[in-house]
Amino acid sequence: MAQSRAPHQKNPSDHGTDEASAYAGLNGEPPNSVDAERAVLGACMFHRDAVDEVRGLLEGADFYRPAHETVWRALLALHTDDAPTDPIALAEYLAGTGELSKIGGAVYLHQLVGAATTTGSAAYYADIVRRKADLRRLRETALRQYQRTGEPGADPDEIRSAAEADLRTERERALASGTGRLSRYLTNGWDFVTKAADTQPVWGTREQTAWASGESLMLVGPPGVGKTTLAHQVVLARIGLNDSVLGMPVVPGKRVLYLAIDRPTQIARALARGVSDEHEAALRNRLAVWQGPLPATLDKEPDLLADLAAAHQADTLVIDSLKDAVSTMVDDALAVAYNNARGRALQNGVEVLELHHQRKSGAESPKAQRPALDQVYGSTWLTSGAGSVLFINGKPGDLAVTIHHLKLATREIGPLQVIHDHEHGTSTVDPTLDPVTLLRATSSGLTVRELAEVLSGEPEPGRADVEKARRHLERLVRAGLATKAEGAAGGNGGGQQARYHASTRHIGVVS
């Protein structure tokens, strides 16, 4: 006859015992500290200034006892009206709302005041209440996951996705409330001003910045004009394979995460043009590529960009292309939501490069015609949140295109007449329109107006073209690449304009 086991002994053939114990534990008393809740409320009732200290730490839902949440909301209402928060005032207020008897009457309010040892401890006790509330929420999240595993036809992948979404929501809630809500992106005024001024641009110079650090760069244009080609050159420079693109320096980063959301196979073929076997180590270690659709659109999960960058240790994100990362481009509310996603990544130290399209109605604009920001497809809030917008103008497959700087980080770049080498995946500024090359090609130098005529292609350049040429020449003088011979004043058009020459030092170096 088989011997019976003691009740506390487990049979190895029993299944689910540990799971049942864990479930019972989840169903036990949730984490809480009723005493800390009483102390917080009593301190706020004893001295109304304590409300200001505590309301940045606690929300109504952080209280475990419903009666305490009711008292807290009444305290906030009285404080907002600049009224007393003592038990008498609270009793009167709660009687008016019909909730006094539900919280235990005026007697309980006086008991709460007695629970406060000192008003100076209000923040300390509030922190206890907040931590217990966080633990309760995490416990509820765990319980949901446990229950999902027992549902008929439970799918592990779906459960994992749901768990990640729950944790992301909880993390965002924690950051968006309490002390995190009030100080998440806080810095002092001096650092705010000086750190931005001391930051080296990602691409370009301090005077002419194509991509400013801490601000996004948007490359816009119709299909086939070289947006991806140009982006790839910046990416390769960012991982240390080149040091400049279009003659402008690129600061190397640590790691790039390329979101190849649309046409990943074509993107791979395009990138392959600029790499060889010697680049294998850099591409393996410093470039990560996400192929295909994102787990969610960025307007629905504002933390997704920052989370992706953190998960892959990337300090640079490339979105190719923007239309595939957002539910719709024309809805202002969704564009603002995307701006939040972009902003959170930037605040986490991630540089963001976006590839985007223009409106179809403007696809056949002449290259010489300057485009405008309203030709960028989608809500105006997309470009409003960008730091710099470069518009590539041309027709699909063109070897020569024009890049216009529509939104500036510092001073305007270009327009640049750019020649694509489609075989090697490289782009260069047309040397015949480079101001330095033009100066070296003439012994008599150039005036501002003469340079404006060449750059604009117009015999009568407009005022904006003339001023742009003037800025070009003055920058060359400051850089030591050109000299300036001052003109002479004269009446009735008899004066002479200032002329600019390539500097002797520069000619000697390049000759």
Image (tube, rainbow, N blue to C red):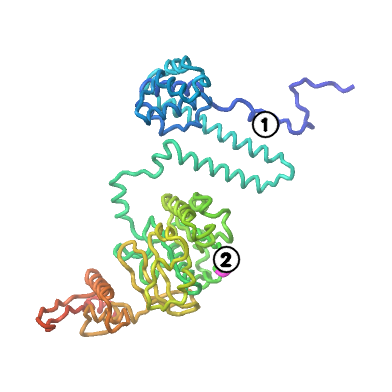
Residue 504 appears left or right of 437: left
Q: Residue visible at 33% across and 56% down?
A: 199
User: Which residue is labeled 2 in the image?
Assistant: 264
Q: Residue visible at 40% across and 66% down?
A: 373
What are the residue bounds of the magenta stretch? 262-266
- Figure quadrant of the N terminus: top right
Q: Quadrant of residue 479 in the image? A: bottom left
Q: Is residue 406 above or below residue 498?
A: above
Q: Position of residue 181 (x, y in %)?
A: 42, 40
For numbered disc 1, what is the local secondary structure?
Answer: helix
Q: Is residue 117 above or below residue 258?
A: above
User: Which residue is labeled 1 in the image?
Assistant: 23
Furthest toward the right, the residue is 1
Relative depth, front residue between 306 and 98? 98
Q: Is residue 219 above or below residue 197?
A: below
Q: Position of residue 507 (x, y in %)?
A: 25, 79
Relative depth, front residue between 336 and 171? 336
Q: Position of residue 98 (x, y in %)?
A: 50, 23
Q: Position of residue 481 (x, y in %)?
A: 24, 73
Residue 400 appears left or right of 10: left
